[in-house]
Amino acid sequence: MNDTEIDAVAPRDVLVVGGGPAAHRLADSLHARDGGRTLRVTVVADEVHAPYDRVALSTRLADSTADLALPATPWAEGSVRLITGERVAEVDAAAGVATTANGLELRFDDLVLATGSSAPVPSIPGSEHIRVYRTIDDVDALVAETRELAARLGRAPRVVVAGGGLLGLEAAGGLAKLGADAAIVHSGSWLMSAQLDEGAGRALGRIIAAQGIDLHLGVRPAKVLTGSGGVVGVELTDDRRVDADLVVFAIGITPRDELARAMGLELGPRGGVAIDTGCAASAPNVWAIGEVASFEGRCTGLVAPANAMAEVVADRLLGGAAEFTTVDDATKLKLAGVDVASFGDALARTDQALEIVYADPARGMYQKLVMTDDAKTLLGGIFVGDASPYASLRPLLGTELSGEPAAYLSASGMEAPAGDELPASALVCACNNVAAGTIRDAVNGPHGEHEAGCAELGPLKACTRAGTQCGSCVPLVKKLLEAELKKSGQTVSRALCEHFPISRQEIFESVRVLGLASFDEIIGRLGTGRGCDVCKPVVASVLAAQHGSYILDGGRGGLQDTNDRAMANMQKDGTYSVVPRIPAGEITPQKLAVIAQVATDFGLYTKITGGQRIDLFGARLDQLPEIWKRLVEAGFESGQAYGKALRNVKSCVGSTWCRYGVQDSVAMAIRLELRYRGLRSPHKLKFGVSGCARECAEARGKDVGVIATDQGWNLYVGGNGGFQPTHAQLLASDLDDETLIRYIDRYMMYYIRTADRLQRTARWMEDLDGGLDHVRDVVVHDSLGLADELETAMAAHVDTYEDEWAATLADPERLRRFRPFVNAPDPDDPRSAAVSGLARVEERGQLRPARPDEIARGEAVLVAGPTIPVRGDDA
């Protein structure tokens, strides 16, 4: 209907009405393609929130602090203007003016309607008491009301959710996790009846019912029953009554097409703005995208079509001719540990379609492929209980499979052929419309900032946007990455190094099973040669993690890197830093005085770290024992800032002092730090504990984060700062102290056993098939049956922990390692304070290493640490 010509001189004004994901995708695309050069874009949202990810609403039920905001790049960088909390009430298309309910007038040359949809509520008696599940505010209100009901009633609130589709299952599952007794009322004969066939729907129903959620199928709510205290139940269309304290409707969507109706635009048969293949409406220079758009008589509430429409309109506004030709109905749901997915012609409506079905009710598994009548071309599929084949099969939709269809179903127990090469046009990420060819091109480079191509999963996702929304395609993206690296000669090997043809995980398991206790034994059984700087520290870490013995004994000293050998971090001038452990950052004035005196006596530079500890810089190797002797005698122990181990547990003051604190975060942080201190791992570990949702300890930026709730603790895992920051993800909610400790034990030991060399927890979880869901299955649901074994391993670490510096000071032979030369005096001999010749410059009241130019100008001074008289000096 519309073709837009771009005037290179006078920018056009584009007004986007609506602030949902579709509007965000359009703004983001225009920002990336145009950057405000030819188009002035304004986005008007009636919600007070900036655009957020509605697909992730269920995470807000589990964690009321979850940040669902989509990237703010378009408005943060100034090419798009964002207005929130304003509802457009009237549009004069002829004049190109839109007016908000507050009287704000906005001019436009092009108007994009992205008003989304609303949650329908039927007109039944008592409907004024019905709650809905649609927006952040809806979810927050449900959480608050559920908790208020629990407190007032003194029992689990009874919640009835009307709707057994995607939204209804998410709402019921989330409210059940909050402690409610949930029930689902669904008009269909089985759950998700729009996406699943009867066999799959019945299988899903058995799984959901087994989790304690009651199902009432083939009926609808007829009346909401109330009493003096509020809602008391729901009367169904078959005259049965279901007790309820809260009623939630999640029965689909109603397109918000009020503006379009007032403008006289053509509407779809079931509502919504009718659009053509260019996503243009029936009036000039008016477009519609997302849930309000009706394409071929149908509105859809899925992410992929909304994103595709946004990309088409962005292209059209910039003079292109992109088309929207089909609606992708693929659906994937993860609910309380249950995988559900469907794609293509899942219900086998194609003439003479052939269905290959594997069902195992005992295992709660149902898998089906829909093929052409010759069993060659893939038309669709359904998965319940195990959706692992979904990511690989979905891009093959419409192509011929190279092997027997049943071999592609994990339930069959057969092995799928490895010969299926995805065509370049195969859609890998439907959410962001990323094809296999785009991913291959990004790997082979150059692409964006990566001149040599993206050789790792993180940069590949950032460059292509594949896997950055729902995440279901990440396993396939990883497979494509590894395949392309292999093609280019970059062999994707799990070998640790040239001396070990196996991975760190395999080395760890072999050491555990075979009882190997030295590097010579390990390389003799598992590798070849003498080892290198890669494998030696890894083996040292594996031995320390399993045996808990002193890291420099038994020939292990030679395996360590510089920092571990010195049990201190070497600085740029060859001196070392000293970091005593200060659990949770809590320290007495007396201990502070000891640190101050040690720093003064040895001329050390002091700095409070981001981990709530005090770092002492500038110590010589031979000074370390004397410094640590004084610190250990004062009750300190090694903070292991030098090791791939637990560094610290950061804490706010929690309920001890803070008026907002709901739990004692300091006590919990101290407990965690004292439990996991000395734990050797593939990479450094940082924990955080916050006493309330304000999150002052920044726990969601840590490998393990703990945030207090009114009911206990929320456990987050897999976060980190650094070069590639990652937010930790919620693993479990409202845990008591003992369950929290138990889950952390399992999580840490599973990471230590299975991660690669120098792999942080965030990257480890990203590389795991299933990611967070897999970790939750292992840690919370004990899907691998490892829970007792992992807990026993952690208990052994706790029982055998020994402070490394205390152990060093107690053994004269161990102390000899800290002599700078063979015939150096013992640390107790005053001659150990001989002048070192280190150049220092005073700055801000402290001494720091001098720069070369300062030394050349004679500005530096020579320092030797403490001045101690030696024999022969005058008294």
Image: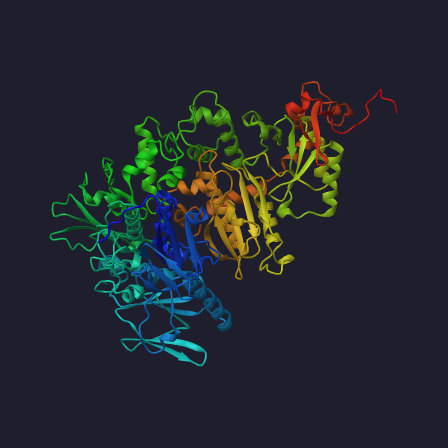
Q: Position of residue 811 (x, y in %)?
A: 68, 30
| Residue 826 coordinates in the image, percent (x, y) | 73, 24
Residue 358, image x, y percentages: 22, 51
Residue at the extreme bottom: 228
Q: Residue at x 52, y 37 (%)?
A: 545
Colouring used for the render: rainbow
Horizontally, residue 95 falls left or right of residue 710, namely left
Q: Front-most of 68 and 297?
A: 297
Residue 464, how many percent across, how many down? 35, 40
Picture quadrant where residue 637 is located: top right
Q: In which quadrant will I find the N terminus?
A: bottom left
Residue situated in front as seen by the camera: 198 or 322: 322
Tell me where residue 766 sits by quadrant: top left
Is residue 70 visible to the viewer in this orientation of the structure? no
As drawn, which residue projects farthest toward the right? 875
| Left or right relative to 428: residue 527 | right
Please report the residue visible at 43 percent of the width from the left and 40 percent of the height from the top.
764
Looking at the image, residue 640 sits to the left or right of residue 71; the answer is right
Q: Is residue 722 above or below residue 22?
A: above
